[in-house]
Image (tube, grey):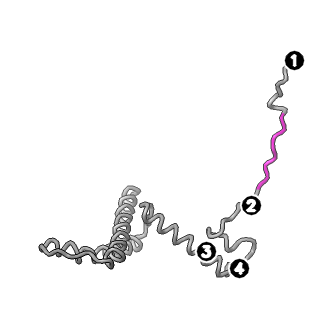
Amino acid sequence: MSNQVDPQSRPRPVRRRREPQLIPGTSGYRLRNGRTGLDPIDNAREASFVEGKFIRNLFTGRLRTTSWLGLSIMAVIGVVFVMPPVFFYVVPLLEGVSVPVTLFDLCFLLPLALIGLALLANTALSIIQNSKKR
């Protein structure tokens, strides 16, 4: 006699369907269980979640759009953000003039240029991805 149990005779666990648990800040959370969606705390939490997702996708290179309006806005804002450091540093260096770096430049112009470069890179990646789909 063996002590093995036949796998067919084992009782199977009962799986219950559960409603998905909504995490605060995700879309749909502020409208859960018949609420109106007008709670200012939930609205602010959802807005901050979307902003964080946008910034994360921007700097990881995953911000994509297929809309030409969105692509043109991203490109224009990217160029506008990149231009001040170019005019303040690159053009004078090409003319042979040295420009001192100030705290304003490090705190304002450098992050602005990085955001502009990220926008331009994501615009180029979106255009490449859209052209491959066609």
- The picture quadrant where one finds residue 90 is bottom left
| Amino acid type of the residue that numbered disc 1 sits on in the rendered structure | Met
Asked if residue 37 is among those painted magenta in the image, a careful observer would answer no
The percent coordinates of residue 25 (x first, y second) are 62, 70
Q: Amino acid at mark 4?
A: Thr
Q: Quadrant of residue 84?
A: bottom left
Q: Which residues are magenta?
A: 10-17
Q: What is the three-letter code of the residue carrying label 2? A: Glu
Q: Secondary structure at mark 2?
A: loop
Q: Which residue is mark 1?
A: 1
- Relative side of 53 to 27, left or right: left
Q: Are marks 1 and 2 in contact (CB under 8 Å)?
A: no
Specify the amino acid type for callout 3.
Arg
Residue 120: tell me if it is visible: yes
Give the distance between the C-alpha atoms of the residues marked 3 and 4, in whole angstroms: 15 Å
Quadrant location of residue 110? bottom left
Report which residue position mark 3 lands on: 45
Q: Residues within 10 Å of mark 1 (few under 14, many from 20)?
A: few
- Nearer to us of marks 3 and 4 is 3
Q: Among all residues in the image, which is located at the extreme right? A: 1
Numbered disc 1: secondary structure:
loop
Cα distance between the residues tagged 3 and 2:
22 Å
Q: Using the numbered discs, state the Cα–Cα distance from disc 2 to disc 4 in whole angstroms.
A: 19 Å
Residue tagged 4: 36
Counting residues from the N terminus, which is met first, the one under dot 1 or under dot 2?
A: 1
Q: Residue furthest top?
A: 1
Say which label, 4 or 1, has the lower sequence index: 1
Q: Is residue 134 above or below residue 75?
A: above
- 3 or 2: tag closer to the N-terminus: 2
